Each structure stands twice: as structure tokens, then as C-alpha cells.
Amino acid sequence: MELDPCCLCRSFVKVEGAVHEDGKGLSNWDVYCRIQGDKPEFLVFSVAQCFLDLILCSCLFIAVEFDFWRVLRFSGNIVDGTNGDIANDHYHRYMEDIEIMQSLGLTAYRFSISWSRVLPRGRHGGVNQAGINFYNSIIDNLLLRGIQPFVTIFHNEYPQELEDRFGGWLSPVMQEEFVHFSETCFKHFADRVQYWMTMNEPNLLAEAAYEKGRSPPARCSPPFGHCASGNSDVEPLVAVHNMLLAHARAAKLYHEQYKSKVNGVIGITVCAYMYIPLREIEDDTEAANRALAFNAAWMLDPLVFGDYPLEMKRYHGSELPSFSLEERELVRDSIDFIGINHYGTLYAKDCIHSSCICNDSTCTLGTDRPISGFVYTTGERNGVTIGEPTGMSEFFVVPKGMEGIVKYIKERYHNKPMFVTENGYSSPGNEDDIYGHDVKRIHYHQSYLASLAQAVRNGADVRGYFIWSFMDNFEWSNGYRLKFGIYRIDRQTLNRIPKLSATWYRDFLSNSSLAGVYLSSTVPDENKDVSMVHSE
Ligand code: FCB
């Protein structure tokens, strides 16, 4: 089997727009974006929604009450005051987008399904047929052009009603909701979709939403942040526990009832930083190993071996939830492949034997707490950054890190098949992006691909590589300020404009220098197709 550097990805909140159209329900991100400092826009929005949907009314008022306090507390959730209401209007322009993908020569496209578009009220209401039709049309049109859909079921967004009713991922009830959502997707799409990911980066979601309070439901406690409520030492662990069990239940259902339809595979995507020791001492080598265990292995150990990493169990007390014997069986071996989202590498410093004071913009807070693994991570050593800075304060350009993280995952998980499901670059000042002369992005991908190719030559079973992202889009709390796309969007006309990197990628795909990198195959023969298409 060959590595296929074929692919682009995007998540729905970030490109679809049409948030009030065709029966889509109110999502956690729709609400979160509405909270604009002392302008309680959300109240207006909620009342308008109530007129539109009387059934939802009562729960929206609960949300109004809840959010009133958040309105008082926050000084703006999205840095540029924007939202995903229109985003890239992919909902109406998806045909044009698919044609662009075809013109680039893609063999796969990774996208997520909007939970609130398909099930506006979760299990408390019906399926929104317009949402199903939309994704059916995307899937059919991709396949018609020889592009494999890689579907992520959950990418950060869910119906707000699930938050208001029982607290979202902090409650085990969310597991049932997720299984219901997954089953709805399998029922409608598994006859054509071969590649499934249950979730995108549960580890990063837990950190952003429940440790740092920087994405909905924005919960945290000091020293990590100052939210109205939350417990940064405990809640990330609870949320991840529920997500892992939800994943496992959905994957079991898929394996038992849907896999055979097109002999598909199901995996998960994790946020996977690489960490290297800050100082050349044993303590920091251990700290780097701990950081890796508290990041990617937090998700992957349970899903491959059936339990949390020993490194985590050693430092956590009863706040780390435990799996019953039955749950261990359920989560163990519940992924067919590992999806790796890799952007950058950080230094790790031990905080058990050394004092750790956070004094630069990239370092971690709360290093005296188990939730941080007693590790201080930073992008700087003696005032020098680990690699070239990018638009994201924690992402530095360190191509070697790609080889490092793939090697780590290969060795820890006995070379389970992997896909690099995200890798991408945003420039610090956006100048390159505005003029479409994004040479640095091209260099980024070239050097990261070269590093990945090295890992593959050393035997890593990597099946594909996805660039983040197809188009500049709504980058969560960073709004439209951060740009990762190989296409730029004119925000007035919403026209898609290729950057230099789009031309480079098209040429690269038609003349792939990674062709001929053969890997051992453990995925069924039918699933080889996607990886073969571009590699001859
Ligand atoms: C990843 C997210 C993706 C995008 C990139 C920049 O963590 O999965 O949606 O925001 O970061």
C-alpha cells in the first residue's frame, strides 16, 4: 500500500454557513459566537428563533437565562467579533467546491457532519431530511468524481439543547446522544462512505472547553482561566471519558451492523503534538514522554489497549475516571486506524524536580497540577523559538516533529494504520494569504511531507495525508483572522481564489514524489483503492 498525499479537509461549522436554513437547529457554536462582550446579541437571536420554532422555545429560554450570565462575564468570544452564520457559504456552493477539488486532482476529502443540521434537537426531535439530502448530495458528487469521502461524525459542534438539558459531554447521557447521531449517519451514508472518524480531537476539545474555557461551554477554574463555573482539574477528564465511551459504542455499532455494507473502516482523530526535552537531562526526557502520554496517548491507549496510560494513572488520583471491566472490553481495539492531527512541536520541562514559572506567550499554566502532567511546555528556549512562529501561538514550524510523532505512535501502537488527518500552516501576519503568494505554506507542506516520507521509509504504516485546509475559514475562537487555506475567500463576494499553494498542490499531486513508497497493508484490499489513485 502506498502513502497518498491526496487530500484536503474542513469542518462544517467553519465553512457551511446557512445556520438558520432548512431546519438546522441551534448549535453550541451558534450560541457561543453570539456572546459579544456587553452586547447581548444572543438574546435577540434566541427570541427570533423562538418565533421560528415554538417547540424549541422553552429550552431556548433556559439557554437565555444561562447565557445572560455569560454575556456579563465575557468580553467577546470570537476575537474578530464574527460568527459562522455565513462562513464560506459551502451549504450553497458545495458543487463549485467539489469541482475545484476535482480540478486539483484530489482522491479524498475529509469533512464533518453538522449534528444540529441532521438532528436539530438530538434525540428529542426527528431527523432533518434537508440535512440528510445535503450530505447525500456531497457524498454522491464526490464519488462521481472519484473522490473518497472521509467523514468525521463529530467535530466540536452539537445541538445547544443537549448542553442545556444535561450539560453536554460532562454527562454520560451524551454517550447515548452520540450513538443516536452516529447511527443516523451510518443509516443514511454507510452504504457509500468507507472511511469514518467518530470524533475530531477529543483531547483538544476537552482542553479548550473544560480546562481553558476558550470554546463552548467555556468552563474552567483558576489558574487556567476565570470562568463562571467549571473545574479545570477534573472536568476535562470526565468529558474525555464520556467521549471515549461514546466513540466505542458507536464503533461497535458500526462494526456489527454497518461495516459490511462497503467494507468500511472506522477510527478517531487526535490532536498530536510532538514534545522534545527542553534541557538535555533525564528529568526533561521523562517530562517529554509524560507530555506525549497526556496528549495523544490519553485517547489512544484506551482505544487500543483498553485503559488510560500508566503515566496518567501514576499522577492522577480518583479524579481520573476508571473503566469497568465491561467498558474496557468495549473501548479496547475499537479503532481500525489512527487519525493524527499534527501541526507543531513544543519543548517539555519537568516540574516535579524543577520550578516552572510561565513567562512567555506559549507556555502552560498550572504546571503544579496533575492535569498538566507536571510538565511545562513551551515554544521557546533561552528566548529562541523552537521553529519559525506561525499565526497560532503554539504552532511552530518543526518538520522533524512529524517524523517524531509518527514514530512514537507507530512504536506505541504496534504500527496500527495511520492517516495524517490534518497538517497545515497559517502565516503570522496573513500578508502571504492576502496576496495569495503563500510560499511559506508551500515550504511548510513540502518539509512536513518529506519528514512524513522518512517515517514511512522507516516502516510507519501511514495511509494518507490531508492538508488543513481547503479554504480559509471560520477558525473557531480566532474567527476569520487565522488563515490555513490553500484557497482564499473574498469575504465580500465569497469567491474562492487559489493561492500559490493550490497550484503547487495540484502539480504535486499529478507528479507525486512520494509515489513508490510501499507500505505493508493490514486494511482490506478494497480499502487500498483510495491510497493507490494518486501514487502511480
Ligand atoms: C485543529 C482543528 C481544526 C482547525 C485546526 C487549525 O485543531 O481540528 O478544526 O481549527 O486546528
Image: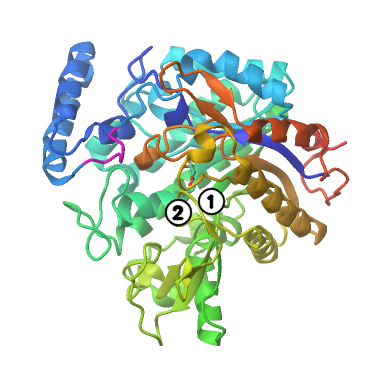
* Amino acid at dot 1: Val
- The answer to whether residue 15 is left or right of residue 502 is left
| Badge 1 element | strand
Q: Residue 205's spot in the image, x, y percent?
A: 40, 49
Q: Is residue 302 magenta?
A: no
- The answer to whether residue 342 is left or right of residue 155 is right
Q: Quadrant of the C terminus?
A: top right
Residue pictured at 62% horizontal, 61% vertical: 401
Measure the C-alpha gap from mark 1 to mark 2.
7 Å
Residue at the spot of label 2? 203
* Amino acid at dot 2: Asn
Corner quadrant of residue 57:
top left
Residue at the spot of label 1? 270
Q: Residue 130's spot in the image, x, y percent?
A: 45, 12
- Residue 360, compared with residue 487, is above or below; it is below
Residue pictured at 23% horizontal, 36% vertical: 165
Residue contact between numbered discs 1 and 2, judged by CB atoms under 8 Å: yes
Q: Which mark is residue 239?
A: none
The magenta span reads 76-81
| Badge 2 element | helix
- The answer to whether residue 168 is left or right of residue 135 is left
Q: How many marks?
A: 2
For label 1, the crowd category at 10 Å Cα-Cα, with few meaning under 14, some 14 to 19 and many 20 or more, is: many
Q: Is residue 77 magenta?
A: yes
